[in-house]
Amino acid sequence: MVDPGRLRSLLDRLGEQLEHLRRLAAIAPEELLADPDRLAGVKYRFVVAIELCIDAAQHIIASEGFRAPSDFADAFAVLGEAGVLPADQVPALQEMARFRNLLVHGYQRVDDRRVLGILGSRLDDLDAFRAHIARSALEEGGGAGVAD
């Protein structure tokens, strides 16, 4: 069974990171590009926010005995397969997991304009994950059980 306290903590922390990212998104892109410290803050907060989504997904997967994901992106596919996440949310979350890998591992030079594009257009994907997991796994217990 899902530990509601642990899941709530992860989702609360995700909400805090999203608040920080939204404040950063309100800054003009050229101003962020000119400030390497703020830009680094954007990247760091993205990594933390995405990892919180991954941690929540893995907690639900382990708690419910779903199949083991092959990588971070696959964790969202597992939740989709199990009916915990709507199928239409899965691809966007998988892209965010891959974006996190790019930021963390630097497989290629990170295009700062791409980072700012994601900052300006993709926070709703993480917000939708947070809201859906809170609703389905905590409030309704749908798709994932909740321990008392």
Image (cartoon, rainbow, N blue to C red):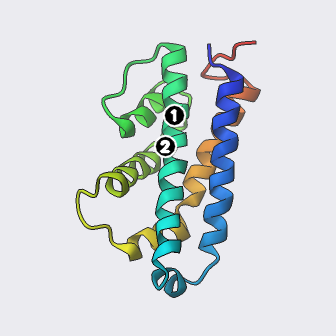
Residue 49 drawn above or below residue 66: below
Residue at the spot x=70%, y=23% of the render?
Answer: 4
Residue 63 drawn above or below residue 10: above
Secondary structure under tag 1 reads helix
Q: Is residue 131 visible?
A: no
Q: Which residue is denoted by mark 2 in the rendering?
A: 51
Quadrant into which the C terminus falls: top right
Taking the view exactly as shown, the residue that stands out farthest to the front is 37
Residue at the spot x=66%, y=27% of the render?
Answer: 6
Q: How many other residues sit within 10 Å of disc 1, few (<14), some (14-19) or many (≥20)? A: some
Q: Is residue 53 left or right of residue 27?
A: left
Q: Is residue 35 left or right of residue 145?
A: left
Residue 108: image quadrant is: bottom left
The spot of residue 37 in percent (x, y) is 49, 73
Secondary structure under tag 2 reads helix
**Marks 1 and 2: in contact by CB < 8 Å?**
yes
**18 and 37: which one is in front?**
37
Residue at the spot x=39%, y=18% of the render?
Answer: 67
